């Protein structure tokens, strides 16, 4: 799964949901802010 807008509140919630979901894997998290930061933090 690729999440666009990952630094926003809904994007962060989507990252959590994908990482907890069975059979899904976070392939990329994209946003124009927080470039280079770990999407899992």
Image (spheres, rainbow, N blue to C red):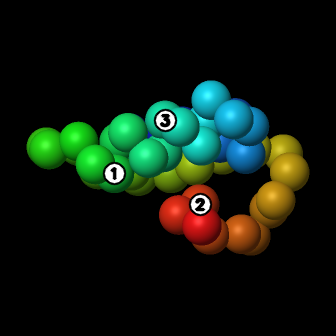
10 Å crowding of disc 3: few (<14), some (14-19), many (20+): many
Residue 29 percent location from the top left of the image: 57, 49
Identify residue for label 1. 19
Image quarter for residue 12? top right
Mark closest to the chain's N terminus, 1 or 2: 1
Residue 14 percent location from the top left of the image: 49, 35
Task: Give the numbered dot on residue 14.
Answer: 3
Q: Secondary structure at mark 3?
A: helix
Identify residue for label 2. 39
10 Å crowding of disc 1: few (<14), some (14-19), many (20+): some
10 Å crowding of disc 2: few (<14), some (14-19), many (20+): some
Q: Is residue 4 visible?
A: no
Task: Give the numbered dot on residue 10.
Answer: none
Q: Residue at x 53, y 37 (%)?
A: 13
Q: Secondary structure at mark 1?
A: helix
Measure the alpha-carbon separation of dots 2 and 3.
11 Å
Q: Is residue 24 above or below residue 37?
A: above
Image quarter for residue 41? bottom right
Mark closest to the chain's N terminus, 2 or 3: 3
In the displayed structure image, the side of residue 25 where residue 2 appears, left or right: right
């Amino acid at each position: 799964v690729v999440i666009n807008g990952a630094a926003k509140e809904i994007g962060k919630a989507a990252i959590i949901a994908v990482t907890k979901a069975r059979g899904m894997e976070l392939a990329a998290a994209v946003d124009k802010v927080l470039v280079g930061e770990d999407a899992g933090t």
